[in-house]
Image (cartoon, rainbow, N blue to C red):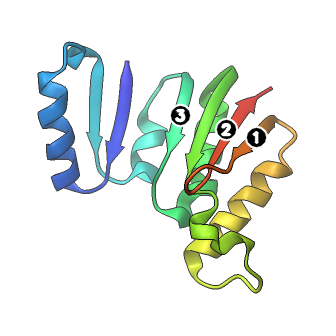
Amino acid sequence: QLHTIEVRPEDAATAKSFFERSQYREQLILHTGNAIDIIPTLPYTWDLVFIDADKVGYIDYYEMVLPQLKQNGLIIADNVLFHGQVLQQPLTGKNAKAIHAFNEHVANDTRTEQVLLTMRDGLLIIKKK
């Protein structure tokens, strides 16, 4: 199964229209609402989690899914360079500060290993030990 969470109903409707045309439609599970509320209700273990959401919530999402991630499972976090703003000092803007804090949080987490891909806006690939 592939689960996706869309906070905006219009984005969920767009995703649903594509899912309905897919040969895998029975395996695609769409949740609409706030991920902070939805993730704790999902009683699954995950092989792969992709985080591309509100930047201020990245640490919370990471901490919520990590216990449910299988050993050697992956989390891929998008936009971890945040337009290069995470490299500029002083950090300005709540999103740049939040992504910088997330990057530091993951870098210091002994439960995982990580690698940063610097293509486009940055992908952080995190593997649970």
The residue to which callout 3 is attached is 49
Most foreground residue, 124 or 94: 124
SS at circle 3: strand
Name the N-terminal-most of marks 1 and 2.
1
**Residue at horizontal 74 percent and vertical 29 percent from the top:** 128
Most foreground residue, 80 or 121: 121
**Residue at horizontal 87 percent and vertical 40 percent from the top:** 110
**Residue at horizontal 72 percent and vertical 30 percent from the top:** 127
**Residue at horizontal 55 percent and vertical 66 percent from the top:** 56
Vertical placement of 71 versus 96: above or below? Answer: above
Q: Position of residue 116 (x, y in %)?
A: 72, 46
Q: Dot 1: few (<14), some (14–19), or many (≥20) neighbours within 10 Å?
A: few
Q: Position of residue 104 (x, y in %)?
A: 79, 59
SS at circle 1: strand
Q: Dot 3: few (<14), some (14–19), or many (≥20) neighbours within 10 Å?
A: many
Q: Position of residue 6 (x, y in %)?
A: 31, 48
Q: Position of residue 76 (x, y in %)?
A: 59, 39
Q: CA distance from mark 1 to mark 2?
A: 5 Å
Q: CA distance from mark 3 to mark 1?
A: 15 Å
Instruction: Report the amino acid beneath label 3.
Output: Val
Instruction: Report the amino acid beneath label 2.
Output: Ile
The residue to which callout 2 is attached is 125
Name the N-terminal-most of marks 3 and 2.
3
Exactly how many numbered labels are in the figure?
A: 3
Do tag 1 and tag 2 residues touch (Cβ < 8 Å)?
A: yes
Q: Which mark is residue 115?
A: 1
SS at circle 2: strand
- Image side of residue 36 versus residue 28, left or right: right
Q: CA distance from mark 3 to mark 2?
A: 10 Å
